[in-house]
Amino acid sequence: MLNMNISETPGWYAGWGTLALVNAGLAQGKGRSGLNWFVASLFLGPLATLCLVLSDPLWAET
């Protein structure tokens, strides 16, 4: 069996941090606070991405 400890795999940290940066950019593109979503993404990860993708922008596009 594969016995992986997340603390022993630095790739997980790099991937999670990259996802948080992507989510911050996505949030800013939808008129939301990039910093708030960056911090939320550090804790929620892919769930934050799902929330952002499913949410509507804060302004009406013309």
Image: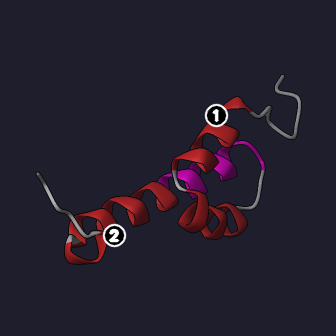
Q: Position of residue 9 (x, y in %)?
A: 20, 70
Instruction: State left or right for residue 21 relative to residue 11.
Output: right
Instruction: Looking at the picture, tell me which residue is in the foreground, 53 or 28.
Output: 53
10 Å crowding of disc 1: few (<14), some (14-19), many (20+): some
Q: Which residue is mark 2?
A: 13
Dividing the picture into quarters, in which one does residue 44 lie?
A: bottom right
10 Å crowding of disc 2: few (<14), some (14-19), many (20+): some
Instruction: State left or right for residue 33 relative to residue 14.
Output: right
Q: Residue at x 17, y 61 (%)?
A: 3
Dividing the picture into quarters, in which one does residue 17 lie?
A: bottom left
Which quadrant of the rendered structure holds the C terminus?
A: top right
Instruction: State left or right for residue 5 relative to residue 3.
Output: right
Residue 35, disc: none
Q: Residue at x 82, y 26 (%)?
A: 61
Q: Position of residue 43 (x, y in %)?
A: 59, 66
Describe the element under mark 1 as helix, strand or loop.
Answer: helix
Q: Please give the range of residues in magenta.
A: 22-31
Q: Residue at x 54, y 67 (%)?
A: 42
- Is 32 magenta? The answer is no
Q: Residue at x 20, y 76 (%)?
A: 8
Q: Position of residue 54 (x, y in %)?
A: 70, 30
Dot placed on the residue nearer the N-terminal end, 1 or 2 = 2
Instruction: Check the image and name the residue furthest to the left.
Output: 1
Amino acid type shown at disc 1: Val
Dividing the picture into quarters, in which one does residue 56 lie?
A: top right
Residue 53, disc: 1
Instruction: Check the image and name the residue furthest to the front.
Output: 1
Alpha-carbon distance for marks 1 and 2? Answer: 22 Å
Describe the element under mark 2 as helix, strand or loop.
Answer: helix
